[in-house]
Image (spheres, rainbow, N blue to C red):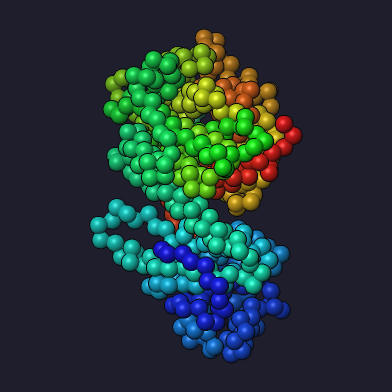
Amino acid sequence: MEVTLLRQSALTADADVLIVLAAEDGAAPPKLGAGGTDALIARLFASGEFTGGAGEHALIHAPAGVASPRLLLVGYGKPAELSADAVRKAAGVAVRQIRSKAVRRAACVVPAPASDAFLAAAVEGAILGDYEPDFLKSVDSSRDKRLDSFSAIAPSNSTGSAEAAVARGVIVAESQNFARDLGNEPANVLNPTELANRARLMANQEGLEIEMVEQDRLVQLGMGSLLGVAKGSAHPPVLVIVRYRPAEEYRAKTSQASHLGLVGKGVTFDSGGISIKPADGMEKMKYDMCGAAAVLGAMRAIARLKPPIPVTALVPAVENMTGAAAQRPGDIVKSLSGKTIEVLNTDAEGRLILNDAITYAQRLGCTHLVDAATLTGAIVVALGHIYTGAFTNDQPMMDRLLASARATGEKMWQMPLDDEYKELLKNAYADLSNIGGRWGGAISAAYFLKEFADPTPWVHLDIAGTAWLDEAKPHLAKGPTGVGVRTFVDLALRWESSRGPA
Ligand code: BES
Ligand code: MN
Ligand code: ZN
């Protein structure tokens, strides 16, 4: 899909369909300045057939005074709810409606107030909405429904920075779709080695440094916790490290010391290991590498948008299987940090690979850490599929991350992490248990990671409920969402301005 910025009147835009966003406000229906069409839109509102509620849409053929042969009206909700996120969703709804009608070229009127932010959001919504996880179908009817072009029409108050806003929207959304593509790959294709290959391909294309820490070296280093998880699989584990270093011209002058580390859980398939999962729904555990996909997607965008601080992504890639050499419940492993862990449940494997990656990130000099992981079913019980659970050992770092999440429309909710939870992980034979019992499962998992992240400022995102959709939304296909990409990119880009008290 080709994306452009149009600096011209919506009335003359050359497209198959003109998308017009409308508020849920019958008193003020959108006006294009084409009398007949404006009256028609007002009549749609008056009839009650279209109210402008979020997700509503109405198609008008041959709109008078408009060059496009069709006009698609899309609601975004109450006027006060107009936000970048509302624009992103409405653009997604519009594109998914259009796709079903085999229309190829869309132009979209972008509401004015927050010009650049809304332009970027409209572009993101269109690119994300156009995505379908159908690349493995041999005969694919939906593929020819893709849009050829999407033009965002610059609002009247837009300035010279509008082009850059559109370009940024394209980069961010395509990087999010890159993450969704990785998530969609089945585990027979995307094993740890293949995940590393995809990371290498991306890094080479984007001019990022990449390093693979392979099995022998993991043994040498002493990452016994990560290695234990990999033992049941025919595929060797690998720790993928991707580095972005700002060139002199982009580098922050005031915070040379900051170095952001992004750690993503890369379990290419989670059978549960010897503590095996029930068969029902197990196929979804190919998505257990969506944390890894999110940090790799973020690195793709970071390479192009060039934030002022160094960013290093670490992806521990393993498959959790039940092979003859698989680790058993009761096994005690020694992590890179030196801490010993009794593996009471082999299905709590995410924390076992992440702790070694977190320790390694600290050794590489990361001063601030974020991890993303499909870590616990318990976070889905707590927050459902709407909010990502966020945990921290450093409130200023959390505040910065939540500000980026809010700015980019990724819903995240802070969970507690008080020291009282430490008790849940007590173990008689080792320093820690790898499970914390029935209650507060997402918190004991986060607390386990905190034991390794301390004292580095760190945020843990449990994306188990938000990494994929079991059913399509009006603005988004089912399957992986690419959650985390937008927040990570924004966090890196705003590092300077969002810097709290040291
Ligand atoms: N990958 C799963 C968590 C998960 C479950 C993600 C459902 C998405 C949907 C993780 O490795 C896991 O199995 N966690 C266990 C931990 C338990 C054994 C303490 C869980 O949540 O059941
Ligand atoms: Mn598991
Ligand atoms: Zn898992």
Instruction: State which quarter of the image contains the N terminus.
Output: bottom left
Residue that appears at 56% across and 72% down: 7
- Residue 141, given in percent of the width and then of the height, sits at 30, 65
Residue that appears at 52% across and 48% down: 305
Residue that appears at 58% across and 39% down: 251
- Residue 376, given in percent of the width and then of the height, sits at 52, 35
Instruction: State which quarter of the image contains the C terminus.
Output: top right
In the rendered image, the vertical position of residue 130 relative to residue 23, given as above or below: above
Residue that appears at 69% across and 27% down: 418
Quick one: which residue is furthest to the front in this view?
249
Can residue 265 be seen here? The reply is no
Instruction: Compare residues 77 and 454 and report the one nearer the observer.
Output: 454
Can residue 104 be seen here? The reply is yes
Quick one: which residue is furthest to the left in this view?
138
Instruction: Compare residues 138 and 121 and report the one nearer the observer.
Output: 121
Quick one: which residue is furthest to the top in this view?
429
- Residue 37, given in percent of the width and then of the height, sits at 58, 86
- Residue 268, given in percent of the width and then of the height, sits at 38, 36
Q: Is 266 situated left or right of 57 in this image? A: left
Quick one: which residue is furthest to the right in this view?
501
The image quarter in which residue 422 lies:
top right
Q: Is 134 situated left or right of 248 in this image? A: left
Give the tally of numbered discs.
Answer: 0
The image quarter in which residue 135 lies:
bottom left
